[in-house]
Amino acid sequence: MSCILTNAQWQLLVTLCFLRGEAQLALAEKLLHGSLAPSEIDELCELISNEFLMSGIEESFEPNSYGLELELLLDAVNRGSSADVDGL
């Protein structure tokens, strides 16, 4: 399986993981190297989903622009466990 992230998605993921702690930052690194276990992919997806719920939706429950970025990131991470980061 392959997970292709844009540079912007990679930076967003690293930022989210950095804010949550060293263990999550290690997950981002493992994604880059394609060595995530399915449970670790789930953990990253949960982190992204939580951020979406906290900051990615408007009062009308529609995604804001940040929420749309998070949705795309979630889709990319969900696609697989190895990462080919565009432009790196």
Image (spheres, rainbow, N blue to C red):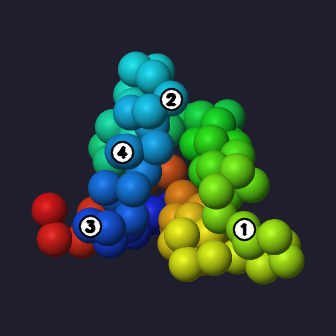
Q: Which residue is mark 2?
A: 20
- Badge number at residue 87: none
Residue holding disc 4: 14
Q: CA distance from mark 3 to mark 1?
A: 23 Å
Q: Which mark is residue 7?
A: 3
| Relative to 14, residue 24 above or below | above
How far across and down, in percent of the image, does residue 15 sit?
37, 45
Q: Which kind of residue does numbered mark 1 sit on?
A: Ile
Between discs 4 and 2, the one toward the N terminus: 4
Disc 3 marks which amino acid? Asn
Picture residue at 39% right of the left edge, 56% below the top: 12
User: What kind of element bears circle 4?
Assistant: helix
- Cα separation, mark 3 vs mark 2, equals 20 Å
**Separation of marks 3 and 4 at Cα, in angstroms:** 11 Å
Q: Residue at x 44, y 33 (%)?
A: 19
Residue at 14% of width from left, 62% of height from top?
Answer: 88
